Image (cartoon, helix red, strand yellow):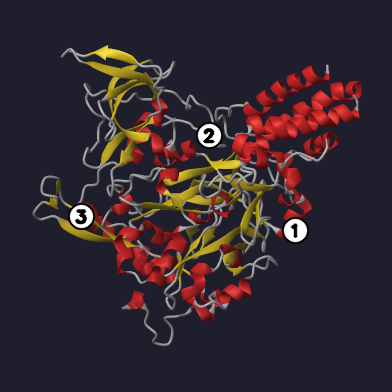
Amino acid sequence: VFFFKKLYFQKMLARSILCAPALLAVGTIAASNGDECGVYLAESSTEHVLGTFAGRNYQRDDAIGSRDAIVQFADVRMTHADQMENEERMQLENFLGVCWSGDATGGMSEADEVISAVGGPCFSSTGHVGMINAIIHQPSTLLRTDSDLLSAGYDETTSPGRGAFTTYHNLTLLAVDKIPAGMEIFLDFGAEYNDYADTSKPNIDDYRKMDEAMEKMVAFFIKHAESIGDTAATEVYEFMKKDVLDLTAEKRAVAARSLLPDTYHGLQKIIDAGGSALHSHPEVVKSLDWLKNNAYCQDNLVPGVSKIEHAGRGAFVSRDIKKGQVVAPVPLVPINNGRIILEYGKIIGEFDEETGAYEEGAERVDLKNLLLNYVLEHPKSSVLFFPAGPLVPYVNHGKKANVKLTWSSKSWSNIEESQNTSPDLLSEVSSIDMMLELVATRNIKKGEEILLDYGDEWEKAWNDHVKNWKAVMKEITFSKSALSLNAIHHGAEKGIKPFPTSSEDPDDGVDDESVELMCHILYDEDKVERRRNQDGTRTKVYPWIPHAPDGEKRLKTDVAIRGVNRMGCTITERYGDETSGYKYLVSPHRVNAGPSVLVKNVPHDAIRYVDKAYMSPQHDRHVFRHTIRFPDEIFPTKWKDLDKGNKGKDEL
């Protein structure tokens, strides 16, 4: 009997270890609750870096924090790396290392090299190979719409704000597992970054599969331990720990076995602790009282269309804020030689692929990256600072400001050390030790827009830009960008307008030189049909699918709406209607992928117009560019490397 029970349990446990549940489809994204702070910033439980902590319980597919801004900037390595000394190159890489790839944020088409500056929980969260519980939800950004901005009166073809603010928004952090209140939030930065393949320590799949196995073990021992006796039950447990894990987990057996208790009596304790991850690392959960007293709330702000003309979006308080209260934490990211680093160029003119050169009369235009509009600058320092706080990039200028910047007073932020660090070494200082606070200068009611005084120089520069804009409009007629064109087909107010097929008239205002149609394509290669063409040849037709057929890989939901699945496409046929939903037969513009194919049943929402490289408004020659003034009264003396006649590179 004991032998057969061992065989039965071996099969049962093997099945439980090998068969993890598939990820659920991403559903409706939940919002934060009322006056309860939903997400905090504090020192990470892993090391002396920033960490993000849940302020309430999150369910799978809940959004964490407010939807934030993304600032795309172009070609910093391509433009400057070859001219840099080793130290300067290291400083640049330290800055880029805390940014995101444009592929992850939908900005990959902006230029040849695209980097994304982000703030909030997407910036302050760290990684952990075994406890990944959140991801950046790419569909939220890739499928963003701007109907709110356009319906509020913004006209990108005439506004002096054209190209002066980021149109990349809706950056969303999504829970991919249940997250209890107080737990640190860990992101998936990729297999290489997280040492996912290291067989000596558990990864996220090991934790999840062993938790499922332990629940089934407990059920087994509750049912059979008394009848077979403690000695036999212990032998079964040891058999499972050694033989079954060696068989089923193979190379990962050592890591998986490390999560099991010494005896089967300890299984329930691990389950009661919330699973093997929390049992192994109880320090990742803070009490809510500790967070309220020692951490910063990261969801005091929500985005909305600014009440300031031509300003784009703004930041509005989500709850009443008292005078002296911190509205948002502002961790700083230093950019050494930032005024130079954020310069780049583009060629205006046609490129001849046969000669490998630009046509006669082509012109190189020197430009300044949009990121310049979002950084803090002091005229006596060569270093610029990106303020990576939650929704801080949305905080607009106002002389009747209701917030100011001060230095952090948190015990876990070593401000004094960073203030005494020389500028050339600031890139090596973690943002946890360069923390500002956005503090209310008066009581602020829920729903009020937050305004910060950018400085007199900024205001004068903006006023001059607005005055000169009329002359610009007389010289140039701007075409619609993807922002306006997508609103035609995805605007909620006017209903859904279908995309035209290749045999129909194109949309009004489409400039093929500046925009192109993109589809998010993922198809099942095992379900192929063949369509006969008029010339007798056949074309393969595949069905569009929302998820990869082989299921999840780590904790990333392998959905079709991801940057890596976006490609140019031609719409061949359309079927359906507004009620049932439009679907399309498309021909993807695949690069070096062999014969052309067709993909059917591509949903309407998976298709977007995208600005071609260097053609979106942020690359225009006449856009407004100016930094935000770092207040004199709080700027460290040690950082003034351009003071007293010491001219740095930026002034030469």
Q: If you read the primary sequence from the N terminus, does the residue marked by circle 3 or circle 1 appear first?
A: 1
76 left or right, relative to 250: left
Q: Secondary structure at mark 1?
A: helix
Residue under the point 47% across and 80% down: 640
Q: Quadrant of the N terminus?
A: top right
**Circle count:** 3
- Measured in 3D between alpha carbons, the distance from the residue under mark 3 to the one under mark 1, in whole angstroms, is 53 Å
Q: Is residue 466 visible?
A: no
541 left or right, relative to 152: left
479 left or right, relative to 575: left
Q: Amino acid at mark 2?
A: Lys
Camera-side mark, 2 or 1: 2
Residue under the point 42% across and 19% down: 581
Residue 515 point in image, percent of width and height: 27, 39
Tag 3–tag 1 contact (CB < 8 Å): no
Residue under the point 66% across and 29% down: 17
Q: Of all residues shown, which one is farthest toward the left?
A: 360
- Measured in 3D between alpha carbons, the distance from the residue under mark 2 to the one under mark 1, in whole angstroms, is 38 Å
Q: Of all residues shown, which one is farthest toward the front?
A: 3
Q: Which mark is residue 553?
A: 2
Q: Secondary structure at mark 3?
A: strand
Q: Amino acid at mark 1?
A: Asn
Q: Amino acid at mark 3?
A: Ile
Q: Which residue is mark 1?
A: 293
Asked whether 526 or 382 is in front, the reply is 526
Residue under the point 40% across and 28% down: 522
Tag 2–tag 1 contact (CB < 8 Å): no
409 left or right, relative to 101: right
Q: Which residue is mark 3?
A: 347
